[in-house]
Image (cartoon, coloured by chain):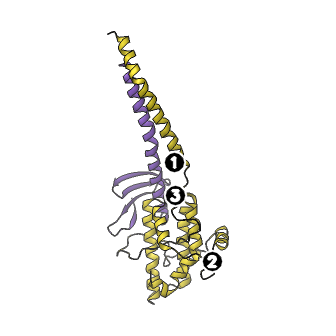
Chain colours: A purple, B yellow
Amino acid sequence: MNKRVQVWTLIVAMTAFFTGPSRAAEDVSLLKDMTSVIALLGLPCGQVVSVKRLGDNDHIASCKDGNRYRVFLNAEGRVVAQKQ
Amino acid sequence: MSDSSVESHVEEQLMPAMRIAGLLFLLLTASCAWMERTPPQSGAPQGEAVTVEPSKSRPAGQSVPKTDLPDAKTPAKVPASPVPAEQTRKKESATPGPGKPGVPPLDLTALETRLKETKAIGVFTKITLKNQVDDLLDQFRVYYQGRSKISLAELRQSYDMLLLKVLSLLQDGDPSLARMVVASREAIWGILADPAKFATL
């Protein structure tokens, strides 16, 4: 019984170890994506430090300089960044 | 059966599974390390001319600030040729101007595909760039219809700015594609600045 617990602990630990970094990589790429979008739209931001997902293609991006933008895809297929 | 014998029996059964699991994790770790070191994909062959292909239609209605368009209020701050000297040198050495012998044909489709597939630019960024390319194309359409107050020189500035944005996004993540964009720069401008060629877009 003790061995089984050890095996399951190992499996859970390994799963967490390998899934954690991939999620973090996704987060980093989304932060970079939002930073690029806001810069391309000519809005002040600096760097996006956190992103909150509101829905499909709809996010709230918080910038290093304190600005927050809702970045979403509108009905016309354009990316819009609305200051919050 | 005593507890110790049950434990040893379970241990015997689990040992091969543990070895296999350990081996699998080793393989997984090795493959992850390999993936991290793999350079960004590049679909088109080296040396192939690549261009930024703007989409042909643009939806009506705009709610995005057009900070980079020619009608923006800060054209004076933009240098006439904002491309860094190093990139200009690369362009000159890599690709002669359009019309010169030895210039590979401009493959707009290949460039469009590579820009769509590159992982150096995020999805939202790609859509934003596409919006801005569409805006620039609209400026050209208005210009050729004679309804624009913008000069061709101002359109060139906007074009250069947009290309710089693309290059700044590509240069770290997909340098080969960035080089191809630089190499195709004058060829694309040749199409945009020629009303007959532009009409075929």
Give the Cα separation between the discs numbered 2 and 3: 27 Å
From the image, which quarter does the N terminus of chain B lie in? top left
Which of the labelled discs sits on residue B53, or is there none? none
Q: Are marks 2 and 1 on the same chain?
A: yes
Where is residue B53 shown, x and y percent of the image?
47, 73
- N-terminal of the pair, mark 2 or mark 1, is 1
Where is residue B39 shown, x and y percent of the image?
55, 54
Give the Cα separation between the discs numbered 3 and 1: 11 Å
- N-terminal of the pair, mark 3 or mark 1, is 1
Left of B69 or right of it: where is B178? right
Provide the residue designation for mark 1. B35
Q: Residues within 10 Å of mark 1 (few under 14, many from 20)?
A: few
Question: In front: B197, or B44?
Answer: B44
Provide the residue designation for mark 2. B102
The answer to the question of whether label 2 and label 3 lie on touching residues, with beta carbons closer than 8 A, is: no
- N-terminal of the pair, mark 2 or mark 3, is 3
Kind of residue at badge 1: Met
* Mark toward the viewer: 2 or 1: 2
Q: Chain of mark 3?
A: B
Question: In front: A18, or B72?
Answer: A18
* Mark toward the viewer: 2 or 3: 2
Can see residue B154? no
